[in-house]
Image (cartoon, rainbow, N blue to C red):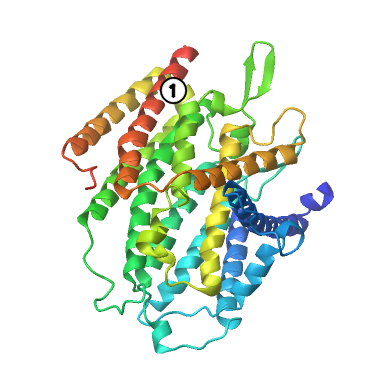
Amino acid sequence: MLESYVPLLIFVLIVLGLVGALVTLSFVLGPSRPSKRKMAPYESGIIPDTPAQRRISVRFYLTAMLFIIFDVEAIFFYPWAVLLRQLKWFGLIEMLVFMGILGIALAHIWRKGGLDWE
Amino acid sequence: MSGIYNDPIGHWVVVVVAIAILLFVVLTATAYTVWFERVALGHIQRRPGPNRVGPWGLMQLAADGVKLAFKESFVPAKTERTLFVVAPCIAVAAAFLAWAVIPIGLWYNVQYWIADINVGVLLVFALSSLNVYAIVIGGWASNNKYSLLGGLRSAAQLISYEMALGLALVPTFMIVGSLRLRDIVEYTVTWGPYHGPIPLILLTPIGFVIYLIAAVAETNRAPFDLPEAEQELIGGFLTEYSGLKFVMYYLAEYVNMITVSALAALLFFGGWYLWFVPPVLAFLLKIVLFLFLYIWLRGTFPRLRYDMLMRLGWKVLLPLAIVNVIVTGTILVASQG
């Protein structure tokens, strides 16, 4: 059971080696001629006058929060889906109750405008 | 061959060699996917595309790769140096690792996979989620307004479509009763006189449509390529990347494209089964057709506006996926009695 993950571990190590090699090569192969202009952030030729890390729209935060709620739900679906044929009506109705609660949550967010980007 | 395989040390040698071959094949396939895209896009736009380097321009990507490798790959001032370098690494590593669980049908009853784990699809999803980190960290570490905005947009887009993607596949798992990709491909039905594997798209057509849309969004491809919308954000999270680190992001994008196409072939079109066509060719053909679909979409559709994109994800695909799960589940349980 667990030994089926050993090849995956080997794969992880090999891929990390490959990635490390790529990054190292990126520094080794190319020339290095830094200049003040080259090192400045590229903003279409306009010299940046404000720092890049600034306040961002709260919409992104809200989206991330909604994602956490619904993605955790999606994970619950997986084991249930695999076992549905054995759980039969009992499993289906249990899940419908769960989905109903989430459906109410989604409808509430929808009505409150939580899904709108303006 | 089986002698080596049963030998305790020989077994691991086979595994390592197989991984090396797989990486080589995926890397080469990525290069030729780019070539295929450029030629196909060229023909869509009534121009020849790359045709100078080597026969039919086949060596174009080798030339581009060498050129980019010898370009200066600098880290701009005031960036978060470590994160700036680590971000493309995450992208590439996650993209390659998904191939550990994808079974490749070589011949009738001969398949190869690196790791045959029973939660295969889940692992692919987990790894594809890591892509969000690569993009948002890369965008944030760049100390550039365009990068930051591109990274954030991308994060919001990826997580929004990830749910639709995850839920779109639930009906498939209900029908097959397994998360192992090999089981899904070899799912057999008895339908009148027919007994054998069937493409699952016949049983979950809506799931496939949702998967297709969400997969295009997940790989940041047109018409969902908002994170690097040139007219608005220059290169998005890629703006400050150059040389091989830029190549790494692109490599990851194209590997992801191939992964998503392979998954579509495995999950919905019966993987390596196709009438009398030899399994390897059948699998390859399905992947290439999907890649062509991707390119066709890019050549045909204009980019979506950001609010339309989010509306499509949250207000159309997500409810549709949930309804699809409920309906498929009910039919499945009812038909079982």
Between B46 and A44, the one nearer to me in the picture: B46
Q: Residue at x 22, y 58 (%)?
A: A57
Q: Quadrant of residue B331?
A: top left
**Mark 1 — on which chain does it sit?**
B
Q: Residue at x 78, y 49 (%)?
A: B6
Give coordinates of residue B152: x percent, y percent: 33, 59
Q: Is B148 located above or below residue B155 in the figure?
A: below
Between B11 and B172, the one nearer to me in the picture: B172
Question: Does dot 1 land on a helix, a strand or a loop?
Answer: helix
Q: Residue furthest left?
A: A112
Give coordinates of residue B257: x percent, y percent: 55, 50
Give coordinates of residue B325: x percent, y percent: 40, 27
Relative side of B168 to A11, left or right: left
Between B272 and B2, the one nearer to me in the picture: B272
Q: Disc 1 marks which amino acid?
A: Thr
Q: Residue furthest front?
A: B46
Q: Residue at x 54, y 80 (%)?
A: B72
Q: Which residue is mark 1?
A: B328
Q: Is B114 located above or below residue B53 in the figure?
A: above
Between B27 and B105, the one nearer to me in the picture: B27
